Image (cartoon, rainbow, N blue to C red):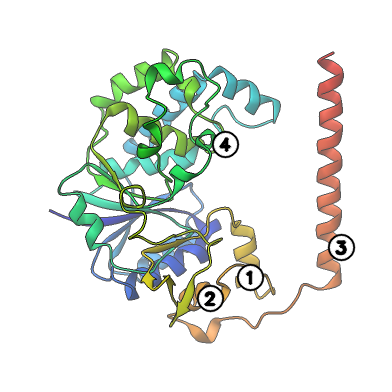
Amino acid sequence: MTNGIYILANDVVFDHLVALLNSLEVNGAKDIPVCIIPYDDRLKKVRGEIAIRPNVTLFDNTDSIHFWEDFATQAWTSHAKAQKVWQAKGLKSVHCLTRHRKLCCFDGPFDKFVYFDADTLLMGCLDYIYQKLDRVDWVANDFQYKSDLNYVFDLSSDKLPHIFNIEQLPSHTFCTGLFASKKQIFNRENSVQLLDNLTSGEAEIMCLSASDQSLLNYLVARSKISFYNFAYSQPEQVTGNHWSSKFDVRDYVLYDKGRRLTYLHYMSISAAKINRLCAGEDVEIPYRDVFLHYRYLKSPETQPKLAPPNLLVCLQRNIKSWGLQKVNNVQFKLRNFWDR
């Protein structure tokens, strides 16, 4: 039985990806094969990195990509509220459709896998997660359940309490930045009934803020597969993982009250900010030295010396920000006018 790791990435998050791959090599996953799922076709730098890493491959099953994108499209286009809100914002009919490509994990080469968003760093061994998959079908290790449930499901939906027990729902709520499961847990056969439920009205219980996360949470809870969240079941024995927490740093590894983290998640810190940092701009991000250590672990001589942006760059950004705000204000006023 093959254990593996999936990462969703493209050239936009290349700096994130290199840092993550380096952290995998030195923090307990050196011998675990990695498969990168393409977020889109911007892959020139990603392909170059794969070429120099014998343990890393690119997911190239286009049939799987098309299937799961179509699945997500049918689910979300049946969500009337989502269509109205996204259309009003000028967004596509499925917001961030390619994020749903993480569903391709179920068609890949690994029997058991851990999925990572690219904006994570491995800090510790994954053995305990793979071992848990011997007994359950889905494993998480995060504190999403402590957040507002509206970030995952729409609590205003009248259908929600008829589909799920709301009091028990937090025990099955998870962040999709890192999760673990098995090949074919979701497949062409069992997805038919799930999609039928969604398109028959159940899609309305999903929230809009993180479309892929809401859909995956729905699939896991609705299918009633066996589920285990270390952070929910053992909250006093596991560590945090979000950059906003206060951790101790020892030799570029993070510790939470003496316990070594499994991973650090840079969720909500934009790729643009990371890219500016790696281009040499003095950008503040949490645990910056830790991130830069892993990003340039194999090529420390290429790590840039950081300097603040020049006056012209600052001025251009302020003008762009002001212009965007102006456009948004005009669009808002126009919508209000025509909605009278």
Q: Nearer the viewer, mark 3 or mark 4?
A: 4
Would you identify the image quadrant in which residue 334 lies? top right
Distance Cα–Cα, label 1 vs label 2: 9 Å
Q: Residue furthest front?
A: 236
Where residue 52 sits in the image (x, y, percent)? 36, 71
Circle 1 residue: 277
Circle 4 residue: 209
Q: How many marks?
A: 4
Which of disc 4 and disc 3 is earlier in sequence?
4
Which of disc 1 and disc 4 is earlier in sequence?
4
Q: Given the image, on which type of amino acid does mark 4 rest?
A: Ser
CB under 8 Å between discs 1 and 2:
yes
Circle 2 residue: 292
Circle 3 residue: 315
CB under 8 Å between discs 4 and 2:
no
Q: Nearer the viewer, residue 49 or 72?
A: 72
Where residue 14 sits in the image (x, y, percent)? 51, 62
Q: Residue at x 55, y 77 (%)?
A: 289
Q: Given the image, on which type of amino acid does mark 1 rest?
A: Leu
